[in-house]
Image: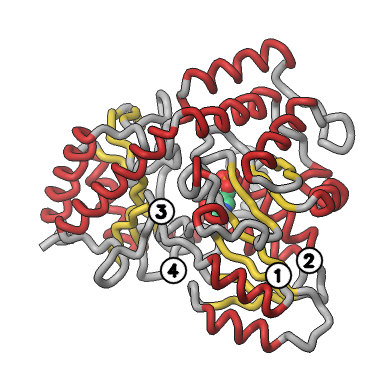
Amino acid sequence: MATLTPTRTDPLSYLTDQLNQLKLKGTHFRLRVLEDEQAPVSTFDGKKVINLASNNYLGLTTHPKLREAALSATKKYGVGSGAVRTIAGTMKIHLELEERIAAFKNVEACVVFQSGFAANAGTVSAVLGKDDFIISDELNHASIIDGARLSKAKILVFRHKDMAHAEEHLASVKDQPGRKLLISDGVFSMDGDIGPLPSLCALAEKHGAIMMVDDAHASGVLGNSGRGTIDHFHVHGRVDVQVGTLSKAIGALGGYVCGSKDLVDYLYHRARPFLFSTSHPPAVAATCMAAFDVLEQEPERMERLWANTTYWKKELGTLGFNIGGINTPASETPITPIIIGEGKLTMEFSRELFKEGVLGTGIAFPTVPEGKARVRTIMTATHTREQLEQALEVLKRVGKRMGILP
Ligand SMILES: *Cc1c(COP(=O)(O)O)cnc(C)c1O
């Protein structure tokens, strides 16, 4: 405001109006600030809390081998790559990571992007064009939706995991010359349920569609040593484009696309984040390589993750929270939503939990549909039973006090 001349009104004042509306609705938020490490107990806004909000599934953000890898790569190669991949920013360590991931996933080739978001948006928009069709689950991640919009292809959205509806869409365009892409999250990020890959693959095969799966929340979580949903369902060779993230269980930052050599070579030439945005610092590539070693060398991390997950879902259900699903929880993964419904109440619940020492982030519209606001909880391998018991105590107390629990 101070920089404006008296004769000029702020042309962005409508943003202030919209923020005020969010405040009235009770869904405006302030960013919580982490003051130490991303860990099962962390300090946010000066307060030590049990952290139920991070995607650090395996506790790798602070793993000594990963720290060491980052430090030594920084000493050896510096802090930045200096250019986009296609100009001068492809370092040997970037290629080594891509080869490591391709071998891990047992596919021909892999290309790493700056983030999972860039991987999805860059790939979908490069592979499809305006005469094509994208058949997409209604709960797919925003980066898939944005990629689909950028591609200018026609987007046909099917009801969540409804294969008959997906097939209806595929059948409706079968006489059209355009290419068809069938696309789903492997694990849905807000509900924690798993995409029906075997049925999706069968549909794609029947209708000659390209099959693409986004395994952001499945990487390091599902399948042998965390190879993802393709491995979990044994649908190897039936998914043409596999996306994964290096930002969640892998503990660092990035996204990758696995598939054929030509898919990857094509993305080198056409994926806009690859062409127009600088590649990872060497420390990131080195960290991720160390993470894949840890996935294979320390299977006990995944075991603890799943033991905590089973315990947590059982206890939350017993307390009487709505964790989605009718008789069995809808979530089949370490993501467990506590569904509250109303946005304002959800945000209040989250704030009260925080005051009592638990970080569970409230998530409302537009991240989830209107009326489906929730506190999303995520288990990790490194939460101790004692921490979880303590968190359950707080959830129970606050839940009862606010009338969320009977
Ligand atoms: C988190 C997420 C992404 C984005 O990954 P980043 O590496 O954080 O950019 C993409 N898809 C899904 C399903 C996600 O949950």
Q: Amino acid at mark 4?
A: Pro
Q: Which mark is nearer the camera, 3 or 4?
A: 4
- Where residue 127 sits, quadrant-wise, is bottom right
Q: Is residue 21 visible?
A: no
Along the viewing direction, whichever of 46 and 327 lies nearer the viewer: 327
Provide residue 82's location: percent of width, then percent of height.
Answer: 80, 26
Q: Residues within 10 Å of mark 3 (few under 14, many from 20)?
A: some
2 or 4: tag closer to the N-terminus: 2
Q: Amino acid at mark 2?
A: Leu
Which disc is residue 128 wearing? 2
- Where residue 112 sits, quadrant-wise, is top right
Q: Which mark is nearer the camera, 2 or 4?
A: 2
Residue located beneath label 1 in the image: 181
* Label 4: which secondary element: loop
Q: Residues within 10 Å of mark 4 (few under 14, many from 20)?
A: few
Mark 1 and mark 3: Cα distance apart in space = 36 Å
Q: Amino acid at mark 3?
A: His
* Label 1: which secondary element: strand
1 or 3: tag closer to the N-terminus: 3
Q: Quadrant of the N terminus?
A: top right
Mark 3 and mark 2: Cα distance apart in space = 36 Å
Mark 1 touching mark 2, by CB under 8 A? yes
Which disc is residue 28 wearing? 3
- Where residue 234 sits, quadrant-wise, is bottom right
Q: Residues within 10 Å of mark 1 (few under 14, many from 20)?
A: many
Q: Amino acid at mark 1?
A: Leu
In the image, residue 74 sits, relative to residue 327, either above or below, namely above
34 sits left or right of 313 in the view: right
* Label 2: which secondary element: loop
4 or 1: tag closer to the N-terminus: 1
